[in-house]
Structures are given as structure tokens and as C-alpha cells.
Amino acid sequence: MRVDVNPFYTRASDNIDTEDRFIKLFSPEILNIFKEFPIWNAVNVLRSSPGGGKTTLFKIFTPKILNTIKNSRSHDDHAKELFNALQELQVFDAKGQPLIAAGLTPFNTQYSTLEYLDLNETQKIRLFCALLNIRIILSSLKAICETKEMVYPKDLSRLSINEEDSLEIPVNLRQLKNAKELYDWATVEEEKICDQIDSIYPDIDTTLKGGDNLFALDLFSPANLKIDGKPLNMKVVVMLDDVHNLSTHQRDFLVKTIVDKRAKVNTWISERLKALTMDELLSEGSKTGRDINFIILENFWAKRHSQFEKFAKSVANLRVEIAFDAKKDFASFLSTKMSTKYGGMIQDAIGTVSTRVKQKYGNIPKYRAEIQTREDSNEEDYERLVDWRTLEILLFRDKNKSQQTLAFEDLEIEAIELQDGNDVKIAAQLFLNDEFKIPFYFGISTLCRLASSNIEQFLNIAGELFDIVLENWVKQMVNSNHQLILTPDKQEDVIKRIVQNKWRELNTSVPQFEDVKKLLEAIGEYCYSESYVPNAWNSPGINGIAITMAERKEIKDSYLKDKSHPYYKLSKCLAICIAYNLIDFKLNYKCKGKDWMILYLNRIYCVKYQLPLNNGKFKERKLKDLLVWLNNGVNFQKKLKV
Amino acid sequence: MLFIMGVGFDPRTTMAIQEIYSHKTNKTRDTVIIRYFKNEDEVVDPPKKSVVNHLHSLDTFLQSRNHNPATVKNLILRSEDDKSIASINATNLINDISFFEAYSDIVIDISAMPRGVFIPLINKALNIIDRYNKENSVKKNLHVVVSENSRLDSIINDRGTDEESTYIHGFRIKQVDRTAEQKEVWIPILGEKQLDQYDKIKAKLNPVEICPVLPFPSENLRRGDNLIVEYQDKLFNGSDFEAKNIVYVDEANPFQVYRLVSQTINRYNQSFALLKGCKIIVSALSSKLLTMGTFLAVFEKKFEGTNVGIMHVESLGHDLDPTYDDEKINIDKHNKMFEIWLTGEPYND
């Protein structure tokens, strides 16, 4: 069994042997997806970048897990919570019996190998369909047995599935009396096909029949299943996982066949964004249509950040519970109080900023009251420093505004009312990070933002932070005064190191990264130059750019289809950025009378350019500007002068 | 004789052919060179300087000895949709026995061939020649030659690895419904700077036992210990590893690797026989010589019907550290040539 010392490195989708452990790590928040997208639509297509949680979501519906939840709910609160959430989705009936039998069919490289063998196209597709039909049959039969707690494969003789009149089902299978006979046929065929795929000789086994349709989906329609002569009363769900492992040709064939077929069984598909065509990548991601849902997990969470934060926190807390064998809040380890080593530095910074404010604005009567309020403040040092820096921004804004409207307005004596919203405060904290190196990226909320709506990204960062908590835990055993918590500066150090490593890894994991890097660096540096301006007019700062929807249409419909087009390279880079989750995008955003496609940097890379992690602020750019950035690089000047 | 060799950046590319062809003979000597291309697009790109130099020196050498010019075979490593197809294409380089018809001896030089290429290539050649030898009284000989140099290996860096691990074509374990309940046993042959590959392979497996293979005796006697230190996090933090499972093999003797890996596979097969058998996955993360020993064991066991396979992670490219140019003489003096006679006359019985 796989046991990680740090449970943050255990992925629920990995080969976790015990159902109990999987359930312990599963947070029910992710099931909220099906509140928006009708779960029992005929086809659910789940898409995300790696680590979005697709396989985990599939696994919760598999029979062994459902049976464990059913049996544990009486003595385990977490299982009870899961049971209730699943019952709401009609996975369990009122008596607590599972209403579905979900068989998981993962795609591995065995299928894509078929595509490159020395066979003709017809042979390839026939073998592909043959193998897939068999795998669907075997996984569904197993799922039915496990759900009904029957012995697999012995008890399959009690199951009859031969009453479907679909003409797609081969004649020889229509003559089989029960599922055991179907099982016996399938296992023999499966071995033959696997041997054929791994064969080093090109000769094809002539006894292999194959086909060009997915008849297995017809076999398991609810009306077609009887157990001991009585209706099964259970939905069979066919879950096809990791479709991105197929070749482009196979994937296109599969998705088209399933979507067109509108099969009578529920068919779920999961795939990574990188498998999508350029056209699909730049289209509206999540949508629900007649009998079919296209769900992009990151899009779902991006629209509901507070829900994602709740989900991420619960995922983290479940792992902390496993590590310490006690309920503890992961957030409590991530201190937001500056460590003592910053005491002197903050004091000096207060001196620097307050002197600067007083020198520049102290002799203007209308600002005196605001300055005096900061002087008299009893808040903690860091809060005082942020207040001073916020005031500096606001006074800069007000003074410039006054100069533009009325030259002598500075002489007004009446105190001004400053609009110091949270955005300006965040900008002030960023400026302090830039000027005095006082930590900015720390705390659980920052961590959730850094995840960019991807739960694995969250767990990777949280895991490295938790490594130090575990280290502190060992030290605490030796010295009881040793604290478990991580100071903000320690958190920021770890986060910056992770970002650096992740950036370095992109070099080998992202295709055409030389070009992609240029584009990302240009966007990052541009956002930096626009965020770090004295009046912080884009407060808290920008972390995205926008192109018009008309330009996006050109990319999708013309540029990407013409390799010789001057905008092809740029368009391809943008598509790669989306496929590899380097940028998030939002379509049809209305602003200044136009429709925009906003391209936000993945939050984790915002750290590299000292950008804020909030969603929202962006700046419009023309596509031709991006082309210049890509071809010639950029040299933006820092505008912030203090 | 048919001499098959890869041409890449590796400084050892032409070493074996120059050594072997320097022995005079009046018999035919034909050469096939394999050129690697990342994808179809790269075929038309100008080759790298190191490749141009090797091609040039090879041409000059063959001409000077009055041998036929080499036949070039292109090998595409990745598909249009960026999937690894190296091992499939390497298998398809040789169609049938007609490829070897005119020769009594076939020599495959793996000095400049990546694992994902030479394992399937030798597998296909060995299969075809074994079949031929069974049916004919005049045997064909298959030799593998390799120039080993651990110092040089240590300054060759992977330019990234494939996203996921995969089985080498022809060496996939049988993962069918009948074997679904079988437990997995993993035998990684550990080598330096392969932690990323180790992680990616382990992520795909769920072994009940891990049997790491370490080099001992070795030129650097501490090499095995250093490897344990390098892999300590991975090995000791997993509940599937026990120190007594470590297998020590002579780093310069592929036949000892073959014997010990074979014995290990046999032992696990016997132990798991009562539990519906087991799947044994072998991963060669070490030198080419040790990889050859591993290949021989898996080849034989697979032939006997054991459920065994070779899993690896494809490298996306390699770089030779620039320090090589300064240290060339010092490093090259450690080159050692090995020859493994795989099938033919000595195996008549």
C-alpha cells in the first residue's frame, strides 16, 4: 500500500489501495459541480489541466467506494457527509442502496500504441473499437457484481443482458445466454488483442473480428439488464478516464462516436485540456446542452473562488488529520503575523515612508488630519506601515487630481475623505514587498489563490509548506518550545522556490517553450510595469491582458489554420498557454463598449512578477502588440519611483 | 558483417566501428546508421554540429577503408501529437530476416543509442535471428557492442523527460482481466540522476515489493552506497521497500545481471504462484551494460511465458556538458569497449 509520510503528496486518484483512505482524503465540496450541471445527462465530459481532480471525481462513484461509504456512514461523520451529498445526487436510494454501477475504464498508452503499429487505418480503428468494447464490457460487468456484492465473475451467470435489439451488437453476442458467457468471450478476445498490440511482427491475427462502433454501450441499457430474471433497476455508468492518452485520431473518433450516439447508458469522459483541438481550446469551455455537459473544472472553480477556497481548505484539513491523527486546521500553521526579525525592518520602513509622506504632503492643510491619524495610530507595526503606504498612494492620487482640476486647490483647509478600499491596501503591501522586501505571499487565502483553481497545484504548494510543519513537529518533540507554525517570510521563501522550480520545469514539459516563455515574460513584465505606478491606479495591480473577441475569432478561424500566417506562431503560443494552464481566460467580457477575451496569468506565475493574486484587473492590448512582444521581446521601464 | 549503429551527439559514436573495421578482411562489411529526429518536421532541419561531425568522420573512415557507404535509416522519436513512438519505430526498422540475409554476423553498436531505441531493436533482431537459427544449420551471429564510460555518462544530461512512463514496445506486461488481481513487483536498476524517471515510473505502479538493483563490485566502490544516498527519500519513505531486497550486481558483467535478475523474477513467481501469480516490472535506469543484462533476463522470461515487462521514461533529448571539450582527453581514456555475443555459433546446443 502506498503511504506517504506527508499526506499532501498522496493523490486521491493514485493507486490508493484502501477505500477507507480514499474516502478520508475525498472532500465532498467537489460534488457541487453537479448542482450546476445535471449529473444524469447522457454524456458528461470533464476537462481540466493535470491535477484538476477528474479521476478523483470518477473514483467516488465506483462500487467499492460507494459500498464503503454506505457501510461506514453509521460510525464515521465524514462518510455520513459524503453519503448525504451522494444521496442528493440520486446515487443512493432512500434505503441507502446504490442506484448506479459505475465501471472505470482508464486509457493508457496501450491504445495509442495501436495508432502507430504497421497496420492499415481500417485495422487500427477496428482493433481500437474491439479493445474498447471489451474493456467497457468487463468493467461494467465487474461494477454490477461489486455493487450487488456478487462474486465476480462466478455470479455473472445470474445476469442476463441479451435482450437488446440494437443491430450494432454482433450476432454472435446476441446468442449468448448470460453475462458469464459474455465475460468468457471478452476475456479471450482481450488477451488476443493485447498480444497483437505488443507483437513485434506486423502480421495480424485473422481471428480478431473488431468493429467500427461502440456496441458495448448498447448492451448495458437499463431495460436490457436482468438479475435472476428480475429487472436490475440500476444505472450503468461507463467512465472513460484519461482520454488524452489516445492519439488525436482515436480521441476525435471516440468523442464524436459517443456524442453522436446518445447511448442509453450514462457515459462520462475525462481528458486533459492539452488533448483539445485549438478550436476547442479557444471556445467557451464549460457548457451544458441537450443530454451533454462539457465541464472544465478550473472554469467552474474560477467563477466561485470562495467555494474553491472552502474546498481546498477541507482537502488540506483532511490530510492534516491523517498526519496528526487529530483534527487540526491547516490554516493555523500559516501565520499571518510578521516574525520578530522583521520588527526592526518594519520600524525603519515606517520611518522612511512617514517621512516621505510628511515631506511631500505635510504642508498641505487638507491632508494634515489624515497624516495626524496615522501618527496617532495604535495599531501593530505592520498595519501602521501599510496604512502609511496606503496614505502615500491616496495622497499622490488626490494631489495629481487636484493639480489637473484646479491649480490652487491644495490651499483648501477642509479635510479630505480618502477612498482607501482594500484594493489600495493590497497595492500598498505589494509596494512594500517591492521596496523593503517585506513578505506579501503568505497565509491560507494566498495559498488558495496561488492554486489557480487547480487542486493539485494547491496540494503541491501546501505539501512543501507542510513538510516544514512536520519538521517542526519533530523538533518540538525534542524542544517543547519549538513552534509548529510557519512565519510569513518562511512561507514566502518556500512559495518563491516552488515558483522558480515550476518555471524551470516548464522548459521541458511545455512544447515550444522558448516562444511561450517570451510571451509569458512579456505579459508578466507588462503587468508589473502597469501595476507598480505611484498612484496604483490599477490597484491592487493587473495580472492579465485582454484582446477583443473579434481578434480571438481571427485566431480561432484563420490564424491557427494557416501555418504560414504571421500570427500563427503567436496564436499557437496562446493555445499552448491555455492547454498547459499557464494562462486562464474569460470570454465575452464587456468593457468600454467592446467584448473582450481576458488572458490572466496563472496565479502561481504572478509571484514571479510580484503581481497581486486577485482576479479582475487587466489591460487591453492589441494582438499586434503581443506579436511585437513575441518577436522582439520587451523592455518595459519601471514607473514606480519612491 | 552488418554493422548497425546510431549517430547522435555522443562522443563514442564512431569508436566501435573504427575499432572493429580496423581488422582487415576481404569479406563484405556493410553499415547501417540510424539517425534520430524528434519529429517529422525535424527531418528537414539542418543537423546539429556534433551529428554533422560524426557523419563526416564516418564517411571519411569508410571511404579510406574502401567499404561501402553507410545506409541511413531515419528514426522519428515522437508522433505529431507528441507521443513517444521511438520504441515502435525502432522495432519497425527491421522487417524480417531479409534484412540480415547476406550476413553471417550482425553487430549492433549501442554506444550512441538511447534505451528506448536499442532495447526494441535488439529484441526484434534477436527474435528474427533466433527463429532463423532454429530452422537452419548455418547460424547467424548477433553481437552487441558498447563503449562504456561512467565519467562521460555523468556529464550527459537529460533535456527533460516524457510526461509519463510507458512500456517499451514488445515488453508490455499482460494487464488483462485475468491478471487484474496479480500483485506488482518492481525491479529498478538504479542509476545516477534518474530520480525524476524513478518517480514517474513509480507513479504508474503500485508494487507490493521493490527490489532495487545496485552496482557492486564497481569501478568506484562507493557507487552503490552513493546511489542509496541519492535514492534514500524514495526508498526509505515507502512501505514497499526492504533493505534485504537489494540485489548487488557486477557493473561490468551483463551476464551476472542477467542471472541475478532472472533468479529474482523466478523467486517472485514461485512465491506468488499461490496468489494467482504476479506482474514483474523491470526498469533500467542505469548504464547500458546493466540494461543489456536486464534485457536478456526479461527477454528470456517473457519467452517462457512469465508476466514481465520493461517500463521506462523516454528522454526528450540529451546535452553533453560543455566541460567535456576541456576534459576530453582525461574523460576519453576511461572508454571501455564491451562485446556481448547474444546468439549464433556458441549457442548451437
Image (spheres, coloured by chain):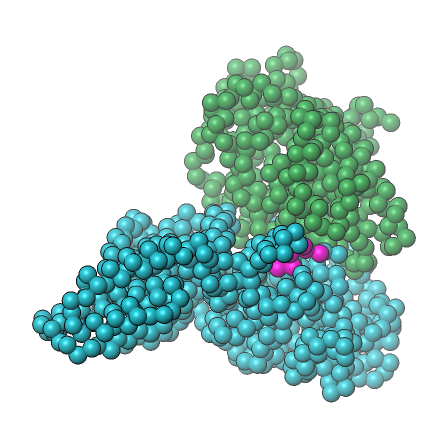
Residue B197 occupies quadrant: top right
Residue B59: percent from left, percent from top: 51, 22
Which of these two is toward me, A362 or A601? A362
Q: Is residue B44 visible?
A: yes
Q: Is residue A424 visible?
A: no
Q: Residue at x 73, y 87 (%)?
A: A94
Q: Please tell me whether residue A5 belongs to the stretch shown in magenta.
A: yes
Colour assigned to chain A in the rendering is cyan
Which of these two is toward me, B94 or B347? B347
Which of these two is toward me, A458 or A332? A332
Indicate the quadrant containing the N terminus of chain A: top left, top right, bottom left or bottom right.
bottom right
Residue B84: percent from left, percent from top: 59, 47
Q: Which residue is drawn at 77% across and 29% down?
A: B255
- Give, as a single range, the part of the protein colored magenta: A3-9
Q: Does residue A229 appear to the left or right of B29 in the view shown?
A: right
Q: Which residue lies furthest to the top in this view?
A: B24
Q: Which residue is drawn at 71% across and 61% down?
A: A16
